[in-house]
Image (cartoon, coloured by chain):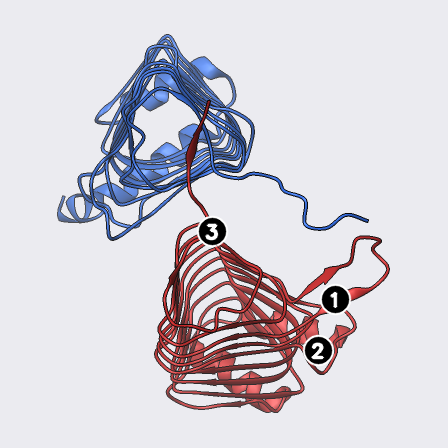
Chain colours: A red, B blue
Amino acid sequence: MINKFFLSLVISILPFSSVRKYFYNKTLSYLIDKNTYLGFLVILQSENCNISNSKIKPFNVIKSRKIRITNSNIDKFNRIINLDCLSLYGCMFGTYNKVYGKKLINTKSKLSIDQNSIVENYNFFDLNDQIIIKKNCKIISHCNFWTHGFDGSRTIMIKGPIEILESVVIESCVTIISSIVIQKKSVVKFGSIVHKNLLETGVYSSNEIFKKI
Amino acid sequence: MKFLKKFKKKIIFIYLVICSILPFNYLRIIFYNLAPGINIKNSQIGFLNIFITNQISIHNSYLGNFNLIKINKLKIMNSSLKNFNLLNNFYKFYINKKTIIGSYNIFNNTKYKKNFFVAIKSQISSKIFIEMDTNIIFRENVVFGGRGSKIINNRSNLKRTFFNKNIYVGSKVLITSGVSIKGCGVTIGACSVVNTDILKPGKYFSKKIKLINEK
């Protein structure tokens, strides 16, 4: 894997998108089609990579066992590291997002984002378990998705998937913990902390500012 | 001549970058002042401050090292701006009368329109993140204490973000843009979330700690 990383680093600093794609396809046997644009310093490290009709802007690191990217746009300065499977279908991925899995990659660490979904800037995804974002969702900025936690004595690690169903809007600075399902067409307001399933459609907020007497 | 006109901005930018790596403060100031639209007096300008601006006026002020400043009009009077700050996409950025801006702050606009930032006798400590598409005004004695507070862009509210006199904001406070804190003498507790206007003075917080279960 170390050699592969250096090889992909060298390829990523080559000039022109077509040259980078050619060398990725030839040397690392990736499947990157003609309509894809790969920016400068896009480091792809994978065992099974398939990218079609997408645009990956400069300065991104993607390290995953499986990569499936179709009809998607990935903006600058994202770090997507140590995943089992990354699948993006027709979505937008903003800038400065971090997606971190465990160093010992487990088979559950999957991130899948469906059609017309938008993930904006400065979001953090912890991938000890899978995160599924379905169609037409919008995640604004500075959100945290945690798929693991601990009990009080810090002996047992609590893991669970996060599933966001269709047409959900998650506003800025929202924190979502593990084992959460958010129902269709819900809105989670600014700065909320989601610690239980939101099974009814609605607008949710966990914050209310009040005056200390 | 056509070549010079076409690449005027780029040539000025390269000239300013070269100025920023010159040794000694007085040398940097002499060469900065030779560029058009720049007026620096009685100030200390640190190493590697990269300016992408049309007008700069800095008087009796301190500018630290390694700042990236992309602003149309920058005006710093009797104030200080420390190290590793990013000021991005502002039309006007004025800091006046003993304002202190610490290190590692990010002031970011997504749109480069007529957005302005004004601070008077205020203090912003370190690692504060301000991102909005609206105007922002800090009046006297607005203090962003601690670390990690954020003003986050709210596209559904395009009013100006306003902080009246004598406001103290604790650590890790989240504020949506477009909020106006009109009360004088407001204190906002740590980790609060401010998404509505605050009209009266007092102490405000939004998070209570509660016992979930007894052992």
Image point (43%, 56%), residue name = A141
Q: In the displayed orientation, state which residue is furthest to the front.
A: B214
Which label sits on residue A158? 1
Identify residue type, mark 2. Answer: Lys
Mark closest to the chain's N terminus, 1 or 2: 2
- Residue A56 screen position, x and y as percent: 44, 73
Q: Is residue B95 visible?
A: no
Residues indicated by labels 1 and 3 sit on the same polypeptide chain = yes
The crowd level at tag 1 (other Cα within 10 Å; few <14, some 14-19, many 20+) is some
Residues indicated by labels 1 and 2 sit on the same polypeptide chain = yes
Number of the front mark, 1 or 3 = 3
Question: A55 and B149: which one is in front?
Answer: B149
Question: A163 and B60: which one is in front?
Answer: A163
Q: Is residue B110 above or below residue A180?
A: above
- Residue A188 screen position, x and y as percent: 41, 60
Query: Which residue is under mark 3?
Result: A206
Image point (58%, 60%), residue name = A195
Which label sits on residue A4? 2
> Where, by quadrant of the figure, is residue B176 drawn?
top left
